[in-house]
Amino acid sequence: MFLVRTTAAALAAFILFSVPSARAQNAPPAGTTFVYLNSAQILQAAPGSADAQRTFDRELGEWRQELERQAAVVDSLLRDYQRQEVMLSPQAKEQKQTEIQTRQQELQNRRLELENQAQQRQQELLRPILESVTGLIEQIRSENNYAMVFDISTEGVVAAAPELDITSLVMQRMGTAAPAAGGTP
């Protein structure tokens, strides 16, 4: 779910604007130039997204475990220092404090590194899915002469007419189940 939520904005950048879905069984009226869809719903149902999510979750879990192990080492050093503090010479105290600070900084650096790596990996996993979905949306936009497609999964649209929702059309073209009527606008 994390993958889908954080990538809805990426899809919005591909398709221009954003908005959520309501009912999408009805096609927009003829001559409609502005329509909307729910990219989060589409991405969640897109072929390959479940596999991408499982891969991302597995890798993220491995990175979390690594950080937890490093944090445990830092915590252990800190507890040892606190137990021994009264018995340590000023020089030994300074040396232990420096070691703890160095380990804490290394942990923080690794955390930032893994966050960047996770973001890059997420983009890598989603790229083919986003390209496919974006191509399909563009094809539907072009075929129906829509001037603009908004994505309601991100903030910006307060209200929209359900008959302008093309989420189910996109999902049908992808070969996935259409959303239930009465979703989110």
Image: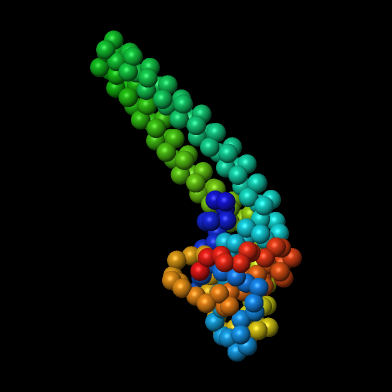
Q: Nearer the viewer, residue 12 or 115?
A: 12
Identify which residue, 32 or 57, lies in the foreground: 32
Q: Give the image quarter of residue 61.
A: top right
Hey, which quadrant is residue 23 in on the image?
bottom right
When asked about the image quadrant of residue 83, the answer is top left
| Residue 72 in view here | yes
Q: Position of residue 151 (x, y in %)?
A: 53, 70
Position above or below: 64 against 73: below
Q: Where does residue 119 sit, x and y in percent of width and height?
A: 53, 52
- Most extreme residue toward the bottom is 31
Give x and y (percent) for residue 136: 68, 72
**Numbered circles on residues, count:** 0
What residue is drawn where x is 29% and y is 10%? 87
Residue shown at 61%/67% (left/top)?
Answer: 181
Give the residue displayed 60% in from the left and 44% down from the top: 57
> Going by the image, does 105 lie left or right of 146?
left
| Residue at (58% x, 78% y) in the render | 163
